[in-house]
Image: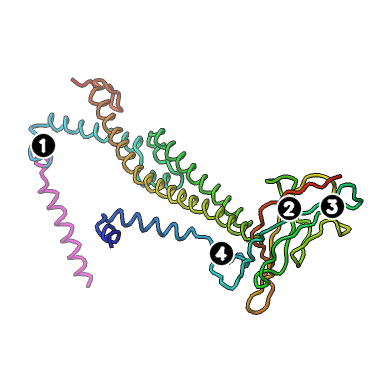
Amino acid sequence: MGSGCAFRMAPMKTKLLLAALVLLLTAACLKHNNPLDPYDNPDIIVPDQVSGVQCFASPAGSANKFVEVRWIANPTLNTDGYYVFRGLAYNSDYAVVDSVATNICNHGAEPWHSVLPGDYWYKVSAFRDVYDDSGTYLGRLEGRRSDPRFIRVPA
Amino acid sequence: MRKIIFTLLLLILATGLLAQIQFDIESFADSTKYGWKDWRARAVYRDGLLDRQEMLQLYEMESSSIGSAILKSALVPGFGQITSKAGTKGTIFLGAELLSLGVSLYLYDRSNYYYDQYLTATQIDEIQEYYSLAQTPRYYSLLFLALGVVIWGYNIYDVILTTDSYNAQVWQEILQKYAKRTVSLGPDGIRVRF
C-alpha cells in the first residue's frame, strides 16, 4: 500500500526510468533450458545428498590394496545409483572412481581400480535417470555430493 | 483570323513601345526613393552589402551543418563534435561509447560461456551455479548496453548544441576579423576603411 502510493506520487520521469529498468532486467532473464534443471519443473526429482559416509582401508601389508566406502542409503524414490569420487586433498579436484547401485563400494575390487598406499579423500553423490512424460530419456541428474571423508591406505 | 492575329500583335507592339517611352530613367535611378540620401549613401550601403555577402560566404565555408554533424555523430559517436572543433568532448563521447559497448560485449560473451556450461551440466550444484554465473553478467551486459544507448542519445543532443555554439563562434570571429580590418584587398583594388 505504502510503496504503491509512493510509486503513484513519483514524478513521471522516475516512473519511466523505473519501468525501463524493470523491462530491461526482465528481458535479461535467461531461460531454464537445461532438461535436468528442476526450476519450474516439479516432475524432476532431485536425489538427496548422501550422508554418513565411512571409509575403511585394507590392512597394512595386504597384497591387494582397497578402500571400502559405505554410506546411508537414499530412498529409492529419488535415487537410482551412486557415484564414488576420490581426491588427493580436501579441496582438490575429485574424479569418479566407481558408480554403484547399492550403498557400499569396494574401491580396489575391480581390475580397473587403482589403489596405492597414501592419503585420499572420498565423496559420494546419488544420481537419478530422468525421463519426460513420453518416456524419452533426458539424462542423468546428479544430486549434491557428500562432505569429503579422509582415509589413509597403509603400505 | 489573320486579321485578328495581326491586330493583337500590333497592340502588343504598341503597348511595349508606349511603356518604353514612358520609362523614366531618372526616376528609376533616384536613390532617395529607397531611403538613401544620395548616391554616396547608396554606394556605402552597397559596400556594406558586399561585405556582408563576403562574410556570409566565409561563414558558409567555415561553419558546420547541423544535419551533417548529427549524421556523423549518429554513425560514430563524438565524430560530429570533433568536426565542430570540440575534440576533447568528441573523444570523451567516443571513448565512453566504446567502453560501454565493449564491456557490454565482454559480459555478454562471459554470460554465453556460462550458459553453455549450464546447458550441459548434470549435477544439481553445477546447474544452479552455472545458471547464476550466466545470469549476473547478462544483467550487467544489458545495463551497459542501455548506458551505451543513453550516451549515444545524449551525444546526438550534444552535437546540436556544440555545432550551434561552434557556428556562433565562427560568426563572431568573422565579425571581429572584419570589424578590425581597416585595409582590405578585394577584386576592385585596395580599400581603406576609417
Q: Which residue is mark 3?
A: A58
Q: Nearer the viewer's eye, disc 3 or disc 1?
A: 3
Q: Nearer the viewer's eye, disc 3 or disc 2?
A: 3
The CA distance from mark 4 to mark 3 is 46 Å
Tell me: residue B30, above or below residue A12. above
Residue B12 counted in the magenta span: yes
Q: Secondary structure at mark 3?
A: loop
Q: Residue at x 62, y 61 (%)?
A: B124
Q: Which of the two residues, B40 or B63, is positioned nearer the viewer here?
A: B63
The CA distance from mark 2 to mark 4 is 32 Å
Amino acid under label 3? Ser
Q: Residue at x 80, y 57 (%)?
A: A68
Q: Are marks 2 and 1 in contact (CB under 8 Å)?
A: no
Q: Earlier in the sequence, mark 2 or mark 4?
A: 4
Q: Nearer the viewer's eye, disc 4 or disc 3?
A: 3
> Which portion, as a residue range, is magenta?
B1-27
Does A106 sit left or right of B160 as displayed?
right
Q: Residue at x 26, y 36 (%)?
A: B53
Q: Which residue is mark 4?
A: A32
**In which quadrant is the N terminus of chain A drawn?**
bottom left
Same chain, marks 2 and 4? Answer: yes
Tell me: residue A22, above or below residue B155. below
Q: Residue at x 11, y 48 (%)?
A: B21
Q: Which of the two residues, B132 or A49, is positioned nearer the viewer here?
A: A49
Q: Earlier in the sequence, mark 4 or mark 3?
A: 4
